[in-house]
């Protein structure tokens, strides 16, 4: 009879250890996915000063545009949560659209090899950001499902695992652009 109680206790301890370790692995994956987003956002932020300086060489009187881009870049670098980063990314995307609209008015700028290379690198980085955002959100979904479904919810409460935020686009980014011919 004593061995049955011991076996049951060992089984319970084993289940607790397995679920705890699973939740740790999932939480670490979420943290890793977030750090991948931060790497790409930092890469994009690092490209912006060169882009602004290149455009300044052709359109120095567009001071307000440059300030808007610089402020948005600072907000992005200061973001600590997915919500803050999403908001700052939306502001930066809007500011960059304005900057590229200014560049459209200067054909010699558009033909500049440095500007073209920076634009290409920025586009590649935007694609990487989109991929890492998707990966992060997929990872958060798996983690949140694990801590909100039975029996994971018991262990999540027991060991204080908290729900994570998704990296969601700002409202302005969700609206499809109007195209007219």
Image (cartoon, rainbow, N blue to C red):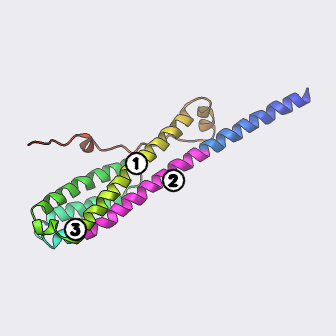
Pointers 1 and 2 in contact (C-beta within 8 Å):
no
The stretch drawn in magenta includes residue 49: yes
Give whichever of 21, 100 is nearer the camera: 100
Residue in the picture at 75% in, 33% down: 12
Q: Earlier in the sequence, mark 2 or mark 3?
A: 2
For mark 3, does the 10 Å Cα neighbourhood hold few (<14), some (14 to 19), or many (20 or more) residues?
some
Furthest residue to the top? 1
Which residue position is annotated with label 3? 115
Q: In the structure shown, which secondary structural element does the residue marked by tag 3 occupy?
A: helix
> The C terminus appears in which quarter of the rendering?
top left
Which residue position is annotated with label 1? 133
Q: In the structure shown, which secondary structural element does the residue marked by tag 2 occupy?
A: helix
Give whichever of 109, 95 is nearer the camera: 109
Which quadrant of the view contains residue 55?
bottom left
**Relative to 60, residue 2 above or below:** above
Q: Earlier in the sequence, mark 1 or mark 2?
A: 2
Furthest residue to the bottom? 57
Q: Is residue 66 left or right of residue 39?
A: left
Residue 97 horizontal/vertical position (percent): 20, 55
Residue 29 horizontal/vertical position (percent): 54, 49
How far apart are the two marked residues, 1 and 2, measured between alpha carbons? Answer: 12 Å
Pointers 2 and 3 in contact (C-beta within 8 Å):
no
Q: Is residue 92 left or right of residue 168?
A: left
Specify the segment rendered in magenta. Answer: 24-51
Which residue position is annotated with label 2? 32
For mark 1, does the 10 Å Cα neighbourhood hold few (<14), some (14 to 19), or many (20 or more) residues?
many
**Relative to 3, residue 110 above or below:** below
Residue 99 horizontal/vertical position (percent): 18, 60
Which label number is shown at residue 4? Answer: none
Residue in the picture at 51% in, 48% down: 30
Give whichever of 60, 179 is nearer the camera: 179
Magenta-colored segment: predominant secondary structure: helix
């Amino acid at each position: 009879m004593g061995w049955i109680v011991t076996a049951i206790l060992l089984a319970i301890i084993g289940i607790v250890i397995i679920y705890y370790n699973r939740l740790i692995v999932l939480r670490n994956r979420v943290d890793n996915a977030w750090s991948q987003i931060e790497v790409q956002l930092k890469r994009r932020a690092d490209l912006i000063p060169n882009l602004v300086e290149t455009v300044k060489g052709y359109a120095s009187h567009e001071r307000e545009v440059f300030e808007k881009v610089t402020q948005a870049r600072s907000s992005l670098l200061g973001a600590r949560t997915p919500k803050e980063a999403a908001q700052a990314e939306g502001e930066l995307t809007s500011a960059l659209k304005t900057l590229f609209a200014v560049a459209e008015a200067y054909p010699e700028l558009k033909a500049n090899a440095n500007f073209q290379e920076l634009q290409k690198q920025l586009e590649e980085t935007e694609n990487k950001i989109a991929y890492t955002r998707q990966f992060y959100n997929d990872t958060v979904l798996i983690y949140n499902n694990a801590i909100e479904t039975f029996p994971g919810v018991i262990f999540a409460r027991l060991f204080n695992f908290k729900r994570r935020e998704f990296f969601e686009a700002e409202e302005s980014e969700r609206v499809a652009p109007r195209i007219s011919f």
